[in-house]
Amino acid sequence: MIVKRILLLLLPLVFFLPSCHKAIKKQQLSNAESKAVIAKIKQKGKIIASTDFNSINYFLYRGEPMGYQYELLQAFANYLGVKLEIVVNNDLQKSFECLDNGVCDMIAMDLTKTMSRSKIVDFSVPIIHARQMLVQRKYSHKSKTEPIRNPINLAHKIIYVQKGSAFAERLKNLQQEIGDTIQIVEDPVSSVEELVLLVAKGKIDYTICDEHLAGVYERNYPELDIKTPVSFQQNLGWAVKKGSNELLKALNNWLANYKGSKEYMLTYSRYFDNPRSVEFAQSEFNTLEKGIISRYDRLIQKYSTHIGWDWRLLASLIYQESGFQPRATSRGGAVGLMQLVPNTAKKYSVSGKSSPDFQINAGVKYLKLLDKEFLSSVHDQNERTKFVLASYNVGINHVQDAQRLAKKYKKDPNLWTNNVDWFMIQISNPQICKDSVVLYGTCHGKETYNFVNEVFERYYHYKNVTDK
């Protein structure tokens, strides 16, 4: 992904491009609409947040979603008692449009609070205070160029910044302060992190980033110098639609307690003070630069076509089962990437020593067999996939017991969501299993219910950060 961004170097310099939020309507919600915003969030059972995809805020590592903003968002969603849905926008213009059009409920990234932005969105209380720092390379004997320490020396320098960022606004003000021209290029393609990487690679000379990120980038890329501030401390926070007072009140109340908690301190330390952040950024398991989920992506893509699934859904199932470990063995004897139970593994001649190719092929054959069992009755593919996943986890007999219970109690036996899934939970109860339509006894139905939800939740994250 990042390599593609280098194409920006072929673009002509674009000076003083319009700010990303000028086209956004200055629309104030009424009190009734403000209350309706949070009521709608509670009703739909989820909050939708726009954030950016990079090696700090939101990324995949070893198949699992991680990130500073992601963890904060998850904690806030838990506080509201709803699920979290993330919309990835590395384009600030699209983030503001997402909020303005009601596609998302909030923007959760390091947004600098400025007067111009405050006219179109409402900011949370500050989450972080940070200065803006000049990103440049260290002195080298080859270039003979000393790092800039005085902003006056930025005159006539070319500085690339993310389009619509507060960095451009600050540099324009800095020009007035130093009484000279700075050549500001608002890049319409690259994110802050991608521009930092371009500096590290010597493709461009200067960019700007916020201070709390500077230390992370300096650890990740030792050739960088990020010691020169170009601003005073500024307030960084999240944004909600103008007039969303009830949501803003809930957010600020949560932040007032959360920011002083041990949980927040551990989260902050994990991403900004942790030497392992270098591992996150540079590991082959980080999806950011290489666009991969696992080392088995090509095999998963190949065999997912056999069942007509999105390969990222199959990848999520494999992660759920084995964490992408081909030699994994469960206490119950399930083996391999797909964790086939002994009888099924024997049917397809699979063992823990079988090749990943053979294991995935066998698992997909079994999934296809389960799919055929529901094909004539469950016509919606998305719903049928949930029945297949549940059957893969607990066995088709227990799923059919849940279907019979659903039918008996006037629910749709061919609809998983809010129908059969509820009865799947109930057959964990021995009393429920005394019902005459339950033929196969109790099972860990709540685990199966969670299994289906977790596979799909991770699948949505995989879709966020990889190409189809």
Image (cartoon, rainbow, N blue to C red):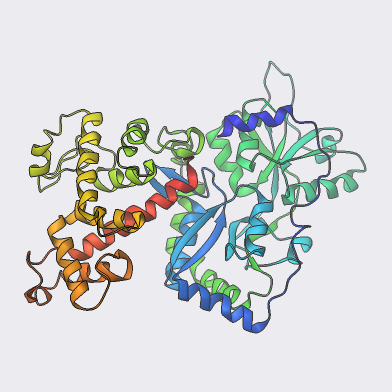
Towards the viewer: 309 or 351: 309
Total number of numbered discs in the rendering: 0
- Where residue 107 sits: x, y (%)? 60, 60
> Which x, y percent locates residue 365?
21, 39
Question: Is 219 situated left or right of 311 in this image?
Answer: right
Q: In this view, does 114 lie to the left or right of 62?
A: right
Q: Is residue 249 above or below residue 64?
A: below
Residue 401 lies in quadrant: bottom left
**Furthest residue toward top:** 142
Which of 353 and 427 lies nearest the eye of the viewer? 427
Q: Which residue lies furthest to the bottom in this view?
A: 32
Quadrant where the N terminus sits is top right
Q: Which residue is drawn at 62% across and 29% down?
A: 200
Q: Where is 130 relative to 428, above or below?
A: above
Determine the residue located farthest toward the right in the rendered image.
179
Image spot of residue 105 (x, y percent): 57, 66
Q: Quadrant of residue 424?
A: bottom left
Identified at 44% across, 38% down, the residue is: 286
Q: Is residue 326 visible?
A: no
Q: Where is residue 369 in the image (x, y as percent from the top left)?
A: 20, 45
Q: Residue at x 37, y 31 (%)?
A: 298
- Left or right of 77? Residue 93 is right
Q: Which residue is drawn at 25% across and 56% down?
A: 376
> Which sits in the foreground, 403 or 21?
403
| Residue 236 visible in rendering | yes
Using the rendered view, name the quadrant where residue 121 is placed: bottom right
Above or below for 134 versus 239: above
Q: Is residue 105 above or below residue 327?
A: below
Q: Which of 191 and 156 is in front in this view?
A: 191
